[in-house]
């Protein structure tokens, strides 16, 4: 299915009061470019995925899909954190399948939210298979990390906030991994603003899919692979690209690292490498706004080690 703005607006109403309306940082007076920063890294759990987690669980409860087994997700990172947090807030049982290689610090945070963590396999694909099997056998509601209408529509609510706070924004720049955030934003702003989809050159799932005319598997590596490490673009994101082609750009490793440092130096924003890809697109010239173009850059995650910033 192709998401619509109505899906995003329904999600916005559903999760109202559950998530933070994160700040939109305006450009400094006299700045040479008109660039706003959407500080979504200040969201609960430090990541935009909390929006989709609440929408998925609340929508499932409305539809009578939630049983005693609660919700299950496969993730070694941000999606697991977000689903565990939302489940705690809503009083829902949560089970998170992680690969055996998942960092202990993230597992501890997931367990700290009260979720049951189960280890399965050494790669995400194995944890994903175990989670879907658990859903089938135990009757738990499966929450996808990104490629699910409830999840993507929830993510898209941050674009509604951007245009509510600054209706004159022309362009929203978003990082793409599996594409749930991109799909939600594309649905929210279709016909109202342009979307620039940014990916690391070492994880070009959407870029390759657009070139091939279909989702394809890609090799993934690099500094942003922990958050933008999907090997194939999600169906929702690909359908969004077919409905309204984004400006698709790639950024190099060095540019991502430099942009992350600049976000800290210039704004004291401690972002993940994946979240810094958006700013990297502007700093590197991968995307050059036209004269007078008003651009919102989404800084979508903060689950990083600040000690690595100088």
Image (cartoon, rainbow, N blue to C red):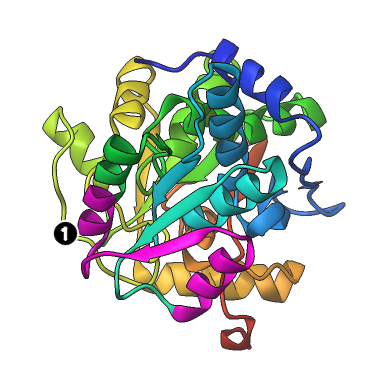
Residue 151 seen in this snapshot: yes
51 lies above or below 253 = above
Please name the residue shown 65% across and 17% down the image.
9
**Disc 1, SS:** loop
Q: Quadrant of residue 158?
A: top right
Against 48, is 10 above or below? above
Classed neighbour count for the residue bearing mark 1: other residues with Cα under 10 Å, few (<14), some (14–19), many (≥20): few
User: Would residue 157 be counted in the magenta stretch?
Assistant: no
Residue behind mark 1: 219
Residue 260 % position (x, y): 56, 70
**Nearest the eye: 130 or 123:** 130
Query: Where is the N terminus found, in terms of image quarters?
Result: top left
Q: Residue at x 75, y 71 (%)?
A: 268
Nearer to me, 173 or 74: 74
First to last magenta residue range = 104-130
Horizontal side of residue 240 vs 158, given as left or right: left
Q: Is residue 275 left or right of residue 167?
A: left
The residue located at (44%, 30%) in the rendering is: 183
- Image spot of residue 150 (x, y percent): 50, 27
């Amino acid at each position: 299915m192709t998401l619509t703005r109505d899906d995003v607006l329904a999600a916005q109403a559903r999760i109202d009061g559950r998530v933070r309306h994160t700040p939109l940082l305006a450009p400094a007076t006299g700045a040479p470019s008109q660039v706003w920063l959407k500080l979504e890294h200040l969201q609960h759990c430090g990541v935009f995925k909390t929006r989709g987690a609440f929408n998925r669980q609340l929508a499932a409860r409305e539809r009578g899909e939630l049983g005693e087994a609660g919700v299950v997700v496969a993730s070694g990172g941000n999606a697991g954190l977000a689903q565990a947090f939302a489940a705690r807030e809503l009083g829902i049982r949560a089970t998170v399948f992680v690969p055996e290689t998942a960092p202990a610090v993230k597992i501890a945070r997931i367990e700290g939210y009260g979720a049951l963590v189960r280890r399965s396999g050494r790669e995400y694909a194995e944890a994903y298979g175990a989670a879907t099997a658990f859903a089938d056998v135990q009757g738990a509601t499966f929450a996808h990390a990104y490629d699910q209408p409830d999840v993507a529509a929830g993510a898209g609510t941050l674009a509604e906030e951007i245009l509510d706070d600054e209706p004159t924004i022309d362009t929203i720049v978003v990082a793409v991994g599996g594409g749930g955030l991109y799909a939600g934003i594309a649905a929210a702003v279709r016909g109202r603003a342009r979307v620039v989809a940014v990916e690391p050159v070492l994880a070009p799932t959407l870029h390759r899919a657009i070139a091939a005319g279909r989702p394809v598997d890609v090799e993934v590596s690099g500094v942003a692979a922990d958050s933008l490490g999907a090997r194939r673009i999600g169906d929702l994101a690909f359908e969004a690209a077919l409905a309204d082609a984004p400006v698709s750009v790639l950024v190099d490793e060095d540019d991502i690292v430099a942009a992350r440092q600049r976000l800290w130096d210039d704004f004291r924003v401690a972002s993940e490498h994946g979240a810094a890809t958006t700013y990297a697109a502007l700093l590197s010239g991968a995307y050059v706004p036209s004269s007078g173009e008003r651009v919102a850059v989404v800084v979508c995650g903060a689950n990083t080690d600040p000690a690595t910033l100088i």
